[in-house]
Image (tube, rainbow, N blue to C red):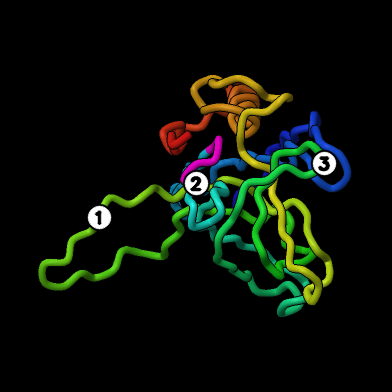
Amino acid sequence: MQAPRGRELLTNSGGSGAARNNDLAVIDLAKNTHNQFIGDITGYMGYGWNNCSFVSSPKTGNLQTAAVSTFGYPYLLDSGAIMQRTDGPTYTTVVGGAWQLWQGSDLTSGSSGGRWIVNFKSRDPLREGDAVAGTASKLAVIGVTSWGTSDPNAPKDNYSSQFRQNAQYPNANYGGYGAGNIASLLNTLCNRRAPGGGTVRTPRKDIATRCS
């Protein structure tokens, strides 16, 4: 097991009501007794910003849309004991002045903080004959569940703050970690003082998905 060393939260949230520009956080974990990061065991997943993999098409009313999978532990499904997954189109929108992602989902209370992933797949298929893989977009975390409908029988609204540049985090580059709120947070976390000296700098800055 890896023990948490600390947490960095975005406090300059922006927006009004439930919707916030920057409802996201990251945490750093100590290495285990074998000198391994948790990602060395579980694998790493990239992150994206500024509407990574979203496209606009007349078929979707010219809305910015992407295929997104969301994950969480809503307590109204299996008492929150089993991770749930929903897949479907996700749109960019603005709610109360805050940049948001929207997906129709019944992931109710308890699923907050669950990741939103574009282009999710479990593994590559076994191809036969002349079938070859096309050019696939990268998997990337683009948000985390922030708020939504608490009643699973009501309109099924689920929202996330967009990982993006905004009024509070306008820069296009934060220390090489990308743009906007997610990059600023990672830059702050990974340059903080670590126990015993040095910084908590990630060795995997390359996992940023540069599809902004």
| Residue marked by disc 1 | 134
Q: Disc 1 marks which amino acid?
A: Gly
Tell me whether the residue at label 1 lies in contact with that at label 3, contact meaning CB atoms closer than 8 angstroms.
no
Vertical arrangement, residue 123 with respect to residue 19, above or below = below
Q: How far apart are marks 1 and 3 (CA)?
A: 40 Å
Callout 2 crowding tier (Cα within 10 Å): few <14, some 14–19, many ≥20:
few
Question: In the rendered structure, does residue 203 fall within the stretch colored magenta?
Answer: no
Callout 1 crowding tier (Cα within 10 Å): few <14, some 14–19, many ≥20:
few
Tag in front: 1 or 2: 2
Q: Residue 96 carries which label?
A: 3
Residue at point 56%, 27% (across, down): 179
Describe the element under mark 3 as helix, strand or loop.
Answer: loop
Q: Disc 3 marks which amino acid?
A: Gly
Residue 126 position within the rendered picture, expressed as x and y whole percent measured from the top left: 24, 70
Camera-nearest residue between 47 and 34: 47
Tell me whether the residue at label 1 lies in contact with that at label 2, contact meaning CB atoms closer than 8 angstroms.
no
Q: What stretch is highlighted in magenta?
A: 49-54
Q: Disc 2 marks which amino acid?
A: Ser
Question: In the rendered structure, does residue 52 fall within the stretch colored magenta?
Answer: yes
Q: Is residue 50 left or right of residue 133?
A: right
Residue 95 appears in view: yes
Callout 3 crowding tier (Cα within 10 Å): few <14, some 14–19, many ≥20:
some
Q: Residue furthest left?
A: 129
Residue at point 31%, 63% (across, down): 124
Residue 169 position within the rendered picture, expressed as x and y whole percent measured from the top left: 68, 24
Residue at point 50%, 44% (across, down): 37
Camera-nearest residue between 92 and 195: 92
Camera-nearest residue between 186 and 2: 186
| Residue marked by disc 2 | 56
Q: In which quadrant will I find the N terminus?
A: bottom right
Q: Which residue lies furthest to the bottom in this view?
A: 78
